[in-house]
Image (tube, rainbow, N blue to C red):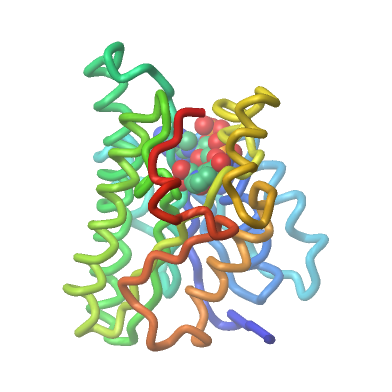
Amino acid sequence: MEISFRGKRALVTGAGKGIGRATALALARCGSKVTAVTRTRADLESLVLECPSIEPCPSIEPVCVDLSDWDATEQALKDTGPVDLLVNNAACAKLQPFLDVTPEQFDQSFSLNVKAALHVAQIVARGMKSRGCGGSIVNVSSQASQCALKDHAVYCATKGALDMLTRVMALELGPYQIRVNSVNPTVVMTEMGKIGWSDPGKARSMTSRIPLGRFAEVEDVVNSILFLLSDKSSMTSGALLTVDGASWPAENLLRTC
Ligand code: NAP
């Protein structure tokens, strides 16, 4: 299936590393202009350097901001041109046993994983609505939105909230031809994935419950994001697309690993 985003502008959050970086590069390869948003300037500089090697040469516009800062985000994104495609990808995973969760950890996680996703989507969707040409938004959620994972109380809660945000956004933005979906991957061995799953015992315990027998690759997630952004999914909105090798049966909803 050929997917082209020629003539489109995409905005990707958390584009410095991992899934967000690979998504930004894949969108550029498919012909889109990309606004790449993250908080580490060095990652943006290396992303821009990596991009010219892509043919035909599209542009990556770097935006450096801490997305958990509402006002700074407003300021940083105010001059971004019309955006057709949004990937709300930035998130943090701070793991603690439930009884040790602190208010700071809770607030930091919800500020980025939920509130910033809502805020960036508001900014982008207002523009889409006023231009009247629709758009597509993908929120990067997680298997953790539906599956209890040890030490992941706050992370799971943020992703559960993001799933409901996806559904309500789809409901309210649909009349403006703005589609909103999420991808819900299992573990991917990015920097974030390594926080929880580097231990071989834990990793085995998780993969043993995934019928396909492996974690997801970054590319598996990127391909699902591209599909949901593209016209190939033009009647799909409000969907939570699992990228988890079929690890959702009821008996798998409680994980002790
Ligand atoms: P990652 O490798 O840790 O990359 C996250 C990116 O987000 C980094 O570029 C990071 O920049 C940026 N970011 C973090 N906090 C930010 C902030 N306050 N403002 C702006 N940018 C910020 O993570 P990943 O594994 O690619 O995860 C991407 C998405 O997939 C997340 O939504 C995650 O929840 C989801 N997901 C991941 C997994 C997994 O196992 N990896 C599984 C399911 C879902 P810095 O490096 O500067 O912090």
**Nearest the camera: 221 or 255?**
255
Q: Quadrant of residue 151?
A: top left
In the image, what residue occupies the spot 43% across and 23% down? 95
Q: Quadrant of residue 125?
A: bottom left
The percent coordinates of residue 78 (x first, y second) are: 32, 55
Image vertical order of residue 102 relative to residue 86, above or below: above
In the image, what residue occupies the spot 67% across and 34% down? 204
**Nearest the camera: 254 or 77?**
254
The percent coordinates of residue 231 (x first, y second) are: 49, 86
Tell whether 212 sits left or right of 126.
right
Examine the rendering and report whether any part of residue 203 can be seen. yes
Tell whether 169 sits left or right of 218.
left
In the image, what residue occupies the spot 29% across and 47% down? 160
Quarter of the N terminus within the rendering: bottom right
Image vertical order of residue 148 relative to residue 141, above or below: above
**Nearest the camera: 55 or 94?**
94
